[in-house]
Image: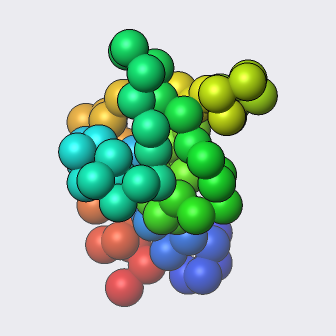
Amino acid sequence: MIDKDTAQKLARSAEAHSKPINFEQLLEDGLLVQKGKSFYAPDIHALPNDVAQRIKSMTPTKNGTKVTFSKESKSAEKLAKLLKSGSE
């Protein structure tokens, strides 16, 4: 059995992986720059925590740090609900 604090951290992480990323808002806020189909982060540390958790890979380039993100997951949503209900 895991303690309540660990369960809550895992639930937040699973929840971050279960929601779609609002790329339009990130582009509008200047947190991401799109060139073609690729996204670049001028300041990787400025990204919201739930978005940063979804980074699958980062590659430094002349255009900035190229980032790719994992897709949202239905199983992560189920896991988040399970962990939340078990930690209460």
Instruction: Name above or below for residue 12 compared with residue 19.
Output: below
Q: Give left or right: position of 85 versus 41.
A: left
- On-image quarter of the N terminus: bottom right
How many marks on residues?
A: 0
Q: Position of residue 67 (x, y in %)?
A: 58, 31
Left or right of residue 19: residue 29: right
> Which residue occupies 64% across, 54% down?
43
| 87 up-or-down from 69: above or below | below
Question: In the picture, residue 7 is in which quadrant?
Answer: bottom right
Frontmost residue, 17 versus 63? 63
Residue 12 in the image: state x and y as whole percent. Answer: 45, 66
Residue drawn at the location 48% of the way across and 64% of the way down: 48
Q: Give the x, y percent position of residue 11.
A: 44, 64
The relative height of residue 46 versus residue 34 in the rendered view (above or below) is below
Q: Is residue 28 above or below residue 66?
A: below
Q: Residue furthest top?
A: 36
Q: Residue furthest front?
A: 62
Image coordinates for residue 84, horizontal then vertical, percent: 35, 71
Judging depth in this view, the residue of 86 and 77 nearest the camera is: 77
Q: How is the image coloured?
A: rainbow
- Residue 14 appears in the picture as rendered: no
Q: Quadrant of the C terminus?
A: bottom left
Give left or right: position of 51 versus 2.
Answer: left
Q: Residue at x 43, y 78 (%)?
A: 87
Work out whether residue 30 can be spotted.
Answer: yes
Q: Is 70 in front, or is 63?
A: 63
Q: Residue at x 23, y 45 (%)?
A: 24
